[in-house]
């Protein structure tokens, strides 16, 4: 049986970059989107999510800033960089190739 967490581990960075591709967001919202868009199949732990944010920011793929706390709790927002967008597109292309190859291998 496939271990969904193992699959998710290899895709975490790409999933986060994808959620940030068109708009800045914060951790809870990103995780909620991943959970919803995967039909509840994937959900990141808080530790995994924030470790990934630190790693992506250190690599220059994300930047972060504190949002305005006027509407409640002050949140750290994340924004994808040009380098992050480039890597995201490359990863999606690689995934599409990989997925097509695996699908071909799994045909009965």
Image (cartoon, grey):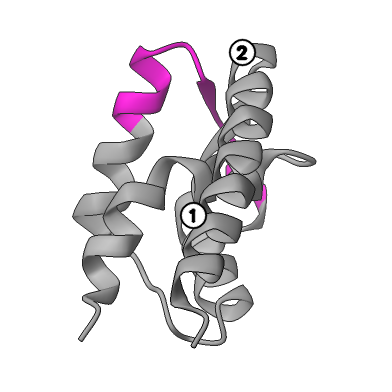
Residue 58 drawn above or below residue 79? above
Residue beneath the point at 51% across and 19% down:
61
Q: Earlier in the sequence, mark 1 or mark 2?
A: 1
Image coords of residue 31 (percent x, y): 47, 63
Residue 39 in sight: yes
Q: Quadrant of the N terminus?
A: bottom left
User: Which quarter of the picture shows residue 57?
Assistant: top left
Q: In 3D space, how far apart are the residues under numbered discs 1 and 2 (Cα atoms)? A: 30 Å
- Packing grade of label 1 (10 A; few <14, some 14-19, many >=20) is few
What residue did someone put label 1 on?
Answer: 73
Give how far across and how far down residue 43 sits, in percent.
37, 72
In the displayed structure image, the side of residue 86 where residue 22 appears, left or right: right
Can residue 45 be seen at all in this image of the molecule? no
Nearest to the observer: residue 1 or residue 31: 1
Which residue bears the numbered disc 2?
83
Q: Which of 44 and 10 is in front in this view?
A: 10
Q: In this view, does 15 lie above or below 22?
A: below
Q: Residue at x 59, y 68 (%)?
A: 33
Q: Nearer the viewer, residue 7 or 62?
A: 7
Q: Is residue 62 magenta?
A: yes
Magenta stretch bounds: 54-70
Q: Is 60 located above or below residue 78 in the figure?
A: above
């Amino acid at each position: 049986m496939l271990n969904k967490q193992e699959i998710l581990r290899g895709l975490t960075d790409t999933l986060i970059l994808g959620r940030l591709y068109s708009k800045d967001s914060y951790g809870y919202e990103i995780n909620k989107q991943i959970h919803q868009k995967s039909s509840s199949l994937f959900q990141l732990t808080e530790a995994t999510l924030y470790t990934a944010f630190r790693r992506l920011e250190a690599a220059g793929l994300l930047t972060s800033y504190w949002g305005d706390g006027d509407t409640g709790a002050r949140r750290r927002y994340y924004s994808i960089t040009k380098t992050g967008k480039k890597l995201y597109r490359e990863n999606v292309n690689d995934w599409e190739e990989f997925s097509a190859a695996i699908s071909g291998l799994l045909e009965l």
